[in-house]
Amino acid sequence: MRWSNLFIPTLRDAPADAEAASHALLVKGGFIRQLHAGHYSMLPLGWKVHQKVAAIVREEMNAIGGQEFLLPTMHPAGVWKQSGRWDTMGEIMFRLTDRRENDLALGITHEEIFATVATELSSYKELPQIWYQIQTKFRDEARPKSGLLRVREFHMKDSYSFDLDWDGLDEQFEAHRVAYERIFERLGLPAFAVEASSGAMGGNTSTEFMVPCPAGEDDVIRCPNCDYAANIEKATSQLDPVEDNMPPPEPERFPTPGIRTIAALEKAGAPADRQIKTMVMVADDEVVLALVRGDHQLNTQKFIDATSTIVLRPATAEETQANLGALPGSLGAVGVSDLRIIADEALRGRTHMTTGANDDDWHYRGVDIERDIAVTEWADLREVSAGEPCVKCGTALEMIRCVEAGHIFKLGTMYAEKFGVTVSDAEGKQRPVVMGSYGIGIGRNMATIAETYHDEHGLKWPVSVAPYEAVVTILKLDEPTTAAAEELYRGLQARGVDVLLDDRDARAGVKFADAELIGIPYRLTVGPRSLADGEVELTVRANGDGKRIAVDVAVDTVADAVTAER
RNA sequence: CGGGAUGUGGCGCAGUUUGGCUAGCGCACCUGCUUUGGGAGCAGGGGGUCGGGAGUUCAAAUCUCCCCAUCCCGACCA
């Protein structure tokens, strides 16, 4: 393509409200424009990158036997009611009504729709199946942010596997894990797999693929020594045991005037690891107590997973007062019998603990949690901190901020049962199929690549996803220079290189700056000065290297480099 | 949803405190001349419901009220 004919609206100044590097550079480079919060127009350059990312995903899905579909984005409420998720999805789902007042939803994911199609599976001989699509998803995110990293409308590759049994699912899951690793490698992303919370998807196992990035929104706990890695919503660690000596026969009430915090109580003689922190939560309109050790933090996702909660919020001061008779600072679970009490595993077996007495300015000490508190359920609720010992090898864990680039789930038979997706097995018995689902956001991966590959001059796309693989820059629009550049351009096209010819009537500095901003991996600069020596200049965007090469080897040099890096 | 900030040509901004000239500057755009290997110079030119509505006033980008939008932090979130 000739640059003079293209719409590549580069800007001298990035919009002031773009903070993430990918956001600023994608706008500045003329790849995207915002329509409104969380909705972006893909301009020609952006769409080319998007399509190249999608093509890599498609190739790898096809390689593991995936079959491409395209399902509707707008769904009748009925299918969502059938799975039960019409009620459990909450505000994340855009809902609307048609002229006949039928309830409709915009798809946030497609388990329900693929399950509906899958009812036509009838025999185990048809299994396994891997079905996928690359299609628009809508999610009414509370806070879209950082350009393409978190939006409300985006393209996702979502795939679904159907197997006769769990062993089959394990194979599909593994096939996807390997496919995803290949995808991220081809995208140039240093992604790694971590244990994850399955959240609203259901199922019992899920793995996220994380890319370290300060603009990300997830914290990952990773062991620098062994292979342990988990989202902080799932991560655990070893804890040093705390010795509880001299358990007293019963809790002792003592006055703590003005003491409202763990730290203040510590000064009054109760070490934080000998305190029980009591938090009052409202889980789907039910008041529930969450107990963690004084020096630990509650991870709300762990609490949600442990209690199968849909909507969780802290109780208001009024609700707390009404249920426990005291305000935060003096709360405890001793003697509470009418509320669910979820306690963190780190508290199991502890005695000689201090906790609030549900009477402002009073606490109990000498509490034996199993004797004195009616714990309903024990669960892993506490949030791991960096530096704690790895559960597998004891090495100090590190915490890394990441972007979630992909997420794969073992779903089981829940959707098959809700939708009646059954097949006959070899004995002629009807069995529900075992499903998995697997997602990669295309635009988010594009933005994550931009986050990973850029410098002060602009983007530095890997060849695999670059909007153009090479650019031939004409420095002087006279006949001999133009003719030489055109010949290189045609030569590269003949070698199958996705090449751009910068034939604009602009100064050299403008052309160089634009080529660097939009991140073309290879630039051939054709000017009368070097041409007089029978040479052109080859500049590599990735490392800034520039060198002169003979005109007659230029096409092969660039084409070979591009081909090697695809 | 809570907190903070911002809305003035395509982009970046000034002007608002203290109401008052035809709403200004840089970039970008158009024309001409010169220039031409790292975002050119000179001259001329086009483009703006000052986020929207209502109000106060002789007079509103500027003051008042209401609303909307966007960004950041948090909550939340596959």
Image (cartoon, grey):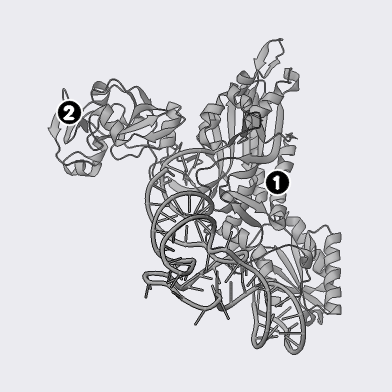
- Tell me the kind of residue under disc 1: Ala
Image location (x, y in percent) of residue A314: 36, 36
Image location (x, y in percent) of residue A180: 64, 41
**Mark on residue A246?**
2
Q: In the picture shown, does residue A316 fall above or below A46?
A: above
Towards the viewer: A182 or A94:
A94
Q: Secondary structure at mark 2?
A: loop
Identity of the residue drawn at 67% across and 57% down: A462
Q: Is residue A49 visible?
A: yes
A68 displayed left or right of B52: right
**Crowd band around label 1 with a 10 angstrom C-alpha radius: few (<14), some (14–19), many (20+):** many
Towards the viewer: A190 or A510:
A510
Q: Please state, as top left, top right, bottom left or bottom right, where the C terminus of chain A lies in the image.
A: bottom right
Q: In the picture shown, does residue A140 fall above or below A481?
A: above
- Tell me the kind of residue under disc 2: Met
Q: Chain of mark 1?
A: A
A493 displayed left or right of A94: right
Instruction: State how far apart marks 2 and 1 are (Cα).
Output: 64 Å
Towards the viewer: B51 or B9:
B51
Towards the viewer: A100 or A352:
A100
Mark 1, residue position:
A54
Q: How many marks?
A: 2
Image location (x, y in percent) of residue A476: 78, 79
Respond whether the residues carrying marks 2 and 1 are from the same subunit: yes
B19 displayed left or right of A518: left
Identity of the residue drawn at 45% across and 40% down: A232
**Residue contact at pointers 2 and 1, CB within 8 angstroms:** no
- Precedes in sequence: disc 2 or disc 1: 1
Q: Please state, as top left, top right, bottom left or bottom right, where the N terminus of chain A lies in the image.
A: bottom right
